[in-house]
Amino acid sequence: MTTKTLFSCLLLAGSSMAVASQPSQAVLDAAKVSTTLSVTDCWIRAIPAPAPAGGFFLVKNSGDQDVKLIGAASPAYGLTMLHQTTHSGGMSRMSEVPSVTVPAKGTLAFKPGDYHAMLEQPDTSVKVGAKVQVSFLFDNGEKVVTQCEIMPANTRGHGHTQHRQH
């Protein structure tokens, strides 16, 4: 069985047992580390539990093909989902999204008021100033693992995530 076939089977099995944006550990283990994708400037806004925390970061795709970010997971949180905030008629609405396309040779910022990760059920390691591991899974079977800094609740932007695209 090829790695791609195995990954596809695990993704299908994992998606039926978990929230769409949170891959199972087996799927993450089967994914290969990307050589064309990177996640930088990652930070998480510390919000007291049980309220969910927002995760913000910059995804760069140096490859020749568009890819979709299809999920994220962290051992420091029980649940991670991809969300988008939309604005209409003076109202903001947040909703879960199954994936977000990162353009070929492009960069996409996940920032407050736009795309972001929603992290719930924090463990005791989640404290302002700490760094937690987050794994990002893409539809091409690749993953990126990075460290995200826990920032105070009043943080509005950090690094390049203050901007939409570069």
Image (tube, helix red, strand yellow):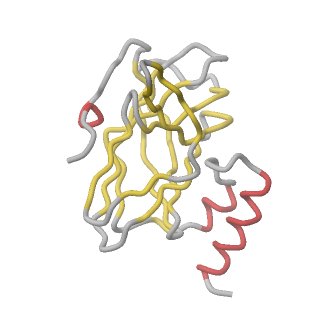
User: Where's residue 164, x and y in %?
Assistant: 27, 40
Residue at 54% x, 42% y is 82
Q: Is residue 50 above or below residue 102?
A: above
Q: Is residue 144 above or below residue 157?
A: below
Q: Position of residue 74 (x, y in %)?
A: 58, 41
Q: Residue furthest left?
A: 166
Query: Residue at 42% across / 41% down in the picture?
Result: 147
Question: Can residue 130 be seen in this snapshot?
Answer: no
Q: Taking the image as drawn, is residue 134 in sight?
A: yes
Q: Nearer the viewer, residue 155 or 77?
A: 155
Horizontal arrangement in the rendering, residue 94 relative to residue 40 (left or right):
right
In the depicted structure, whether residue 116 falls above or below residue 104 = above
Number of marks present in the image shown: 0
Residue drawn at x 42%, y 64% as measured from the top left: 67
Q: Quadrant of residue 44?
A: top left
Q: Give the residue at the far right of this rendering.
A: 17
Q: Which quarter of the rendering shows the N terminus?
A: bottom right
Rendering coords of residue 97 (x, y %): 56, 45
Q: Residue at x 78, y 57 (%)?
A: 16
Q: Where does residue 6 sit, x and y in percent of width and height?
A: 67, 77
Q: Name the foreground residue: 134 vs 125.
A: 134
